Amino acid sequence: MSNGNELDGGQFSRTKLLIGGAGLEALCRARVIVFGVGGVGGFVVEALARAGVGALDIVDSDTVALSNLNRQIIALHSTLGTCKVDAMKARIYDIHPACRVTAHNCFFLPENADSFDFSHYDYVVDAVDTVSAKLEIIKKAKDAHVPVISCMGTGNKFDAMQFHIADISQTSVCPLARVMRQELKKRGIENVKALYSTAKPLANNAPVPASISFVPAVAGLLIAGEVIREITKLTS
């Protein structure tokens, strides 16, 4: 947990001026898990750490690759080949040394979902790519009565001004959101908060989604803002 000096001022003094002592205390007490620390998830974690969240769990099985340098905050020439959760953990400690960080170097799947006790968390962030993992994360969070926000597609997008946060039932345009709406409906799961884009995707015939530096970053920061607002119970 953050020490008293941090809460009284110092590192988080500007944050305290904005959200007050009670808001900062709420963040300090919070434990958030972020599934996926790539283009979107890395910026979620970055913003939560800088805001003073007291405990962060990070989940990812990937390593930093050269192709990540264009958009992932943990991707540097000095971190190439490093496990993403290890690079992220080191970065969190460099930002917020008192944060309690738990790194899970694994690919979250329905088969290993029971190794995570979702009731331990105050908020769950889904920033993974696969539908099966996204559905299981949402289901586990719902079963534990823990708030969850799920990120829809950010690949092949160039207009970062068209991100929205809404219930999954209100999403449009995004192909991933359409699949998630259908699959969640089949499972009888309702009231799922999602970040999605109404921007038309740019044409891309490559086998992987195209990306650029600022789009996933905006998505991640918007998600972090939503998490912080809910934890502190503050509205803009």
Image (tube, rainbow, N blue to C red):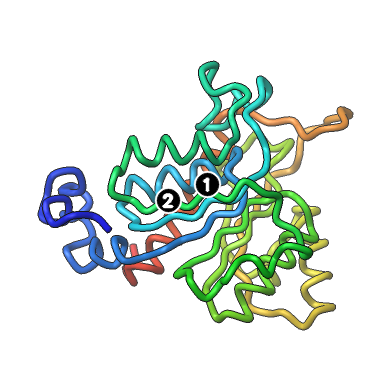
**Position of 135 compared to 195: left or right?**
right
Residue 122, how many percent across, how many down?
Answer: 45, 70
In the picture of the structure, the residue carrying the numbered disc 1 is: 220
Q: Residues within 10 Å of mark 2 (few under 14, many from 20)?
A: many
Q: Which residue is mark 2?
A: 101
In the image: residue 37, left or right of residue 179: left
Residue at left 27%, top 58%?
1
Report whether 39 appears left or right of 89: right
Q: Is residue 214 above or below residue 10?
A: above
Quadrant for the C terminus in the image = bottom left
Give the residue at x 49% y 38%: 88
Between label 1 and label 2, give the one nearer the viewer: 2
Residue sitting nearer the eye, 233 or 48: 48
Mark 1: amino acid? Gly
User: Can you say whether 74 is above or below 76 in the image?
Assistant: below
- Give the image location of residue 71, x and y in percent: 58, 29
**Which residue corresponds to the image point at 68% horizontal and 51% vertical from the top-left?**
128
Residue type, label 2: Val
Question: Between disc 1 and disc 2, whose residue precedes?
Answer: 2
